[in-house]
Image (spheres, coloured by chain):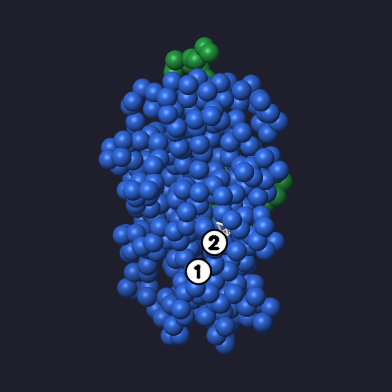
Amino acid sequence: MNMDGFQDQTIARDLVQRIHFWARRIPRKVTIMEVCGTHTNSISGAGLRGLMPENVRLVSGPGCPVCVTPTSFLDMAISLARMPGVTIATFGDLVRVPSSKGSLEEAMADGCDVRVIYSPRDLLALGKELRGRRVVFLAIGFETTAPGVAATILESEKVGNILFLVGHKLIPPAIEALLSAEEVNLDGLILPGHVSAIIGQEPYGFVSERFGIPGVIAGFTPLDVLAAIAEILQQLVFGSPKVVNNYGRVVRPEGNPRAREVMASVFEPCDGVWRGLGEIRGSGLRLRPPWRDLDASRLVTEVVETVEPKGCRCGDVLKGLLDPPECPLFGLHCTPEGPRGPCMVSSEGACGAWYRNERIRGGLK
Amino acid sequence: MCLAVPMRVVDINGSLALAELGGVRREISLELLPEARVGDHVIVHAGFAISRLEREEASAIMELLRGESPAPVS
Ligand code: SF4
């Protein structure tokens, strides 16, 4: 057992033993999904898959905001980037994702103005600096990110030239759609810690109540993830699925009501389109009527026919149906240097994580 | 992208705060966590504090290992 990746090897070994103990008492294959890019990295980086019993499979779900952002959103971003007088501001990971008309990085090479920012708050200074231009922020991310964007929108009115292309997504409706999909068979969920810090525990109730599987809100160290897996397996053995919060040091049962209030003052739910999952009812956010003037999508009049990256299986990877190395392009025609799909580009995408960490360890089948 | 880091609040000025992690200081917003106080550890995501980190509370892992659940023997 290779335990090099752990700060506390005694605890890690104990948890792995527990996992094997419970797994032996389950006479079938068990598939556990995490729904957060940070969990993807933690599992892959620490080599947790290699520590699992034969019958336990760990898969990644739609938990990477860049990966689930559909090509149509990127097409619109590129159209905006190519407009005179427009500066695009974005989180870094989006810059290299291919769309129907190339990536933002390629648009930059053609002279478009694209700025990578770390926080939505950076928009306020950028807007002031670029007076006379329109600054369009590509607002993607889950419940963790949307409240900060909303707080920035409330402040950005003072600046006047900041617009938003809103592609925010909500996690519970996506999980519900996934669990309802016929081809998807999951036995347990590791729930995203920082999304939960905002929404709390209650919105996941349906996971155990309607679908009868365990869900564990977990932190992000490899030990947190191992503990979550042990908990899920134990619940399966006892046949008592419930949703539990193992990340109480950060996640309050009620979440962060203030953050939700700020988010709800600016955004309202709408149907959202996810890469791989398609349109899911009530899974997106859009600006409420008083803020619609700030919606950058109304600047886009040109219609682009969306062309999905050829051969890319991100959609199946995001549903946990396919392990990245099972994609025919993985490692040969799709690498972090020359990515075909977002799951390879993003630092949180499952394909990128496998490529960086598990290719050498024998991850390639 | 939901990556968030724990930082210690060193100074507060209205809804802005100065927070520190490993000697690096950054300005963060307390707009979403107005109850944060100087000395608190907060979880910071994209420039916003989103939650307080409870230092006293033993982690779930520690609780698990304290043995409330039946301890596996083999
Ligand atoms: S390996 Fe590349 S092409 Fe294949 S699913 Fe992943 S991102 Fe898409």
Quarter of the picture holding the N terminus of chain A: top right
Q: Chain of mark 2?
A: A
Tell me the number on the disc at residue A312. 2
Q: Ligand 1 near label 1 (Cβ, under 8 Å)? A: no
Which amino acid, mark 2? Cys
Label 1 element class: loop
Q: Position of residue A95 (x, y in %)?
A: 61, 67
Residue found 48% across the figure and 14% down from its top: B71
Is the C-beta separation of discs 1 and 2 under 8 Å?
yes
Q: Colour of chain B?
A: green
Residue found 50% across the figure and 52% down from its top: A317
In the rendered view, does B52 fall on the left or right side of A1?
Answer: left
Q: Nearer the viewer, residue A205 or A302?
A: A302
Q: CA distance from mark 1 to mark 2?
A: 8 Å
Q: Circle 2: is it few (<14), some (14-19), or many (20+) Cα within 10 Å? A: many
Residue at image mark 1: A308
Q: In this rendering, does residue A252 appear at all?
A: no
Q: Ligand 1 near label 2 (Cβ, under 8 Å)? A: yes
Q: Colour of chain A?
A: blue
Residue found 58% across the figure and 69% down from its top: A98
Residue A70 lies, with reference to residue A7, above or below; the image says below
Which amino acid, mark 1? Glu
Quarter of the picture holding the C terminus of chain A: top right
Q: Nearer the viewer, residue A249 or A318?
A: A318
